Amino acid sequence: MSNVDFNTLTSDYAKKVLKGLGEKENIKHIANCMTRLRLVLADVSKIDEDLLKNETGATKVIIDGNDVHVVYGLQINEIRQAIDAEIKKEKEKEGYIGNVNVKKILEGIGGKDNIKEITNCMTRLRLVLKDVSKLNENILINETGASKVIILDEHNAHIIYGLKIEEIRKAIDEEIKK
C-alpha cells in the first residue's frame, strides 16, 4: 500500500481512484458510509484492485454483483469530497452545468443560434426555433435523457424531459447568456 496523505487529497489522487473504478462513466451510483466508498458500477470488470490498494490507500475491495465497497477507513469523507470535486470538474469540461449536459442539448437543438424562444411547462421544454429541421432527435433522446421530441410545425417543438425540466431550462438559460 502506498503512503497516501489523506489530509492533502489532490485532483491527481481523485483521478487515480476514478481510474481504479473504471472512470466516472462506469459509476452509476456513489455514496459512502463511515469507512467505505459504496458504489454501483456499470461494469465491475473495469475495476483495478491493485491500483486502488497500492496507489489510493484502499485496504479492501469488496465486489458483489455490480455493488462495490472500497474500504478506506475514517478518512472516507475527505476521499469522497475529492472524488466528487473531480467528477464535477470533468463534467464541466464536457459541457455540463450541474447534472445537465447543456452542450449535448444545444447540439441536439441545432445550436443556441437556432433558438428564438425557450420556455417550459411541468415536463416539457418548449422551443420556438429558426429551423426545426436542425433538431437531432437521436442526440436528444439517446444522449440527453429526453423521452420524446414533438415537432409541432416548422418553428415549434417540445422536448419532454419530465420533472427535471426546471434544472434543464435554467442550465440552458445560463449557457445562452454566455
Image (spheres, rainbow, N blue to C red):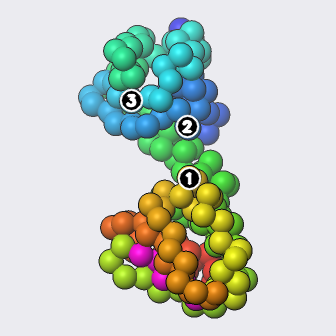
Q: Is residue 171 left or right of residue 124?
A: right
Q: Which mark is residue 142?
A: 1
Q: Which mark is residue 24?
A: 2
Q: Residue furthest front?
A: 153
Q: Dot 1: what SS?
A: helix
Whether residue 24 is situated above or below residue 91 in the rendered picture: above
Q: Residue furthest left?
A: 34
Q: Position of residue 96 (x, y in %)?
A: 58, 59
Residues at marks 2 and 3, CA–CA distance in whole angstroms: 11 Å
Is tag 1's residue or tag 2's residue first in the polypeptide sequence? 2
Q: Which mark is residue 39?
A: 3
Identify residue type, mark 1.
Asn
The magenta span reads 124-128
Residue 111 visible? The answer is: no
Residue at the spot x=50%, y=38% of the render?
83
Residue at the spot x=57%, y=44% of the render?
86
Residue at the spot x=34%, y=15% of the render?
64
Is tag 2's residue or tag 3's residue first in the polypeptide sequence? 2
Residue at the spot x=62%, y=48% of the render?
90
Is tag 3's residue or tag 1's residue first in the polypeptide sequence? 3
Residues at marks 1 and 2, CA–CA distance in whole angstroms: 19 Å
Locate the C terminus and report the quarter of the image it occupies: bottom right
Q: Which mark is residue 109?
A: none
Residues at marks 3 and 1, CA–CA distance in whole angstroms: 24 Å
Q: Position of residue 110 (x, y in %)?
A: 70, 73
Please tell me whether mark 3 or mark 1 is closer to you in this view.
Answer: 1
Residue contact at pointers 2 and 3, CB within 8 angstroms: no
Using the image as rendered, state which of residue 18 and residue 113 is in the foreground: 113
Identify residue type, mark 3.
Leu
Q: Position of residue 152 (x, y in %)?
A: 53, 83
Residue neighbourhood size for the residue with mark 3, other residues' Cα within 10 Å, grouped as few (<14), some (14–19), many (≥20) = many
Residue neighbourhood size for the residue with mark 1, other residues' Cα within 10 Å, grouped as few (<14), some (14–19), many (≥20) = few
